[in-house]
Image (cartoon, rainbow, N blue to C red):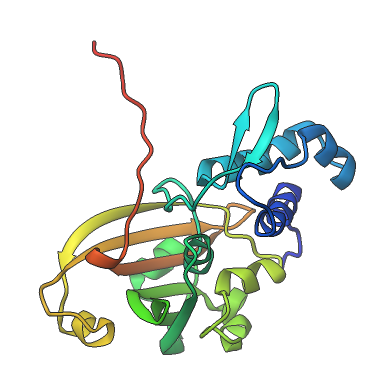
C-alpha cells in the first residue's frame, strides 16, 4: 500500500485547518510564505491554494493576496469532496448510519471499472444535523481498503481514513440524473416513495491514477444542492 501523500494535498489540508479559526476576509500566507514554510516550489503552493479557491473557501485579490471567503459555498460538480467535509463547510454536523458492510466477489461491471476480483462494499445513510440527506453505496477494491472499513464510519470520514493510509482520492468522473425514490430509498431516508432524488454515480481515482471507489449517491432533492460552474462559449 502506497504511503505517498502529495505535497499540495498536505498544504491544502493545513490551510483548511487554519481557515476554521479565521474570520472572513482575513489574509492567508502568500505563495512565497507557503514555499518557505513547507519547502515546496511556487507551483506546488499555488496548486494547493487554487483548489481552495475552486471550492469557494478562499479568494485571491491580484497584488494583495489570498483571503478567507465569507460564508460556505456549496459543492461544485467539478470537485471531488467528501460528504463529511462538505457538510462541515456548510456549518452542519455530519454523521452516518451504516446499512451494510461486506466483502464479496465483484460483479462484471465492478471488475471492469475497479480492476478487482473481490470488492468491499459500504452502504450508508448520510445525515446532516441528524436529518437523512442521502443514501450512499460505495464499492472499493477489497485488497486495498478492507481493513479501513472496520473503522468508526458513523461519525468519522472514510476519506480521511484513506488519506491517513496514504490513499488519496484525487480525481474522478461522474454523471448526474434525476430519479424517483423507490421503496428502499423511502424506507431508509424517511421520505415518500416517488419523491425526486438527485442521483450521482462516480468513479474516483487515487493519486497514482488507479481506480479507487465506485459510488452511487442518492440525494433527497429538497435537502441537497449542487452548484455548477461553467464557461459561456462565444457564438459561431
- Can you give x and y, in whole percent of width and height, for residue 149 in the image? 56, 84
Q: Residue furthest left?
A: 194
Residue at horizontal 35 percent and vertical 79 percent from the top: 131
Q: In this view of the protein, which residue sits in the foreground, 214 or 184? A: 184
Q: In this view of the protein, which residue sits in the foreground, 222 or 202? A: 222
- Can you give x and y, in whole percent of width and height, for residue 225 in the image? 32, 57
Residue at horizontal 33 percent and vertical 79 percent from the top: 132
- Can you give x and y, in whole percent of width and height, for residue 32 in the image? 82, 33
- Can you give x and y, in whole percent of width and height, for residue 44 in the image? 74, 38
Q: Is residue 216 left or right of residue 58?
A: left
Which picture quadrant has residue 159?
bottom right
Query: Could you tell me if residue 214 is visible in this image?
Result: yes
Quadrant containing the N terminus is bottom right
Q: Residue furthest top?
A: 236
Quadrant containing the C terminus is top left
Q: Is residue 90 above or below residue 45?
A: below
Residue at horizontal 31 percent and vertical 20 percent from the top: 233
Query: Could you tell me if residue 120 is visible in this image?
Result: no
Q: Is residue 200 left or right of residue 182?
A: right
Q: Is residue 69 left or right of residue 227?
A: right
Residue at horizontal 63 percent and vertical 54 percent from the top: 207
Q: Is residue 48 above or below residue 154?
A: above
Which picture quadrant has residue 189?
bottom left
Which picture quadrant has residue 64?
top right
Q: Is residue 59 left or right of residue 33?
A: left
Amino acid at each position: 500500500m502506497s504511503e505517498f501523500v502529495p505535497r499540495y494535498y498536505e498544504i491544502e489540508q493545513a490551510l483548511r485547518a487554519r481557515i476554521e479559526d479565521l474570520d472572513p476576509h482575513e489574509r492567508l500566507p502568500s505563495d512565497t510564505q507557503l514555499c518557505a514554510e513547507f519547502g515546496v516550489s511556487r507551483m506546488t503552493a499555488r496548486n494547493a491554494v487554487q483548489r481552495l479557491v475552486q471550492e469557494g473557501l478562499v479568494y485571491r485579490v491580484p497584488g494583495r493576496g489570498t483571503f478567507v471567503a465569507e460564508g460556505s459555498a456549496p459543492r461544485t460538480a467539478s470537485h471531488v469532496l467528501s460528504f463529511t467535509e462538505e457538510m462541515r463547510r456548510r456549518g452542519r454536523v455530519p454523521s452516518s448510519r451504516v446499512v451494510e458492510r461486506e466483502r464479496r466477489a465483484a460483479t462484471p461491471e465492478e471488475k471492469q471499472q475497479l480492476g478487482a476480483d473481490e470488492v468491499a462494499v459500504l452502504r450508508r445513510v448520510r445525515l446532516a444535523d441528524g436529518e437523512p440527506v442521502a443514501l450512499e453505496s460505495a464499492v472499493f477494491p477489497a485488497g486495498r481498503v478492507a481493513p479501513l472499513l472496520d473503522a468508526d464510519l458513523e461519525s468519522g470520514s472514510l476519506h480521511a481514513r484513506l488519506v491517513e493510509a496514504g490513499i488519496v482520492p484525487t480525481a474522478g468522473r461522474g454523471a448526474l440524473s434525476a430519479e424517483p425514490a423507490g421503496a428502499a430509498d423511502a424506507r431508509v431516508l424517511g421520505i415518500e416513495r416517488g419523491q425526486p432524488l438527485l442521483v450521482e454515480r462516480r468513479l474516483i481515482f487515487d493519486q497514482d491514477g488507479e481506480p479507487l471507489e465506485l459510488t452511487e449517491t442518492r440525494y433527497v432533492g429538497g435537502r441537497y444542492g449542487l452548484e455548477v460552474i461553467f464557461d459561456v462559449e462565444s457564438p459561431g
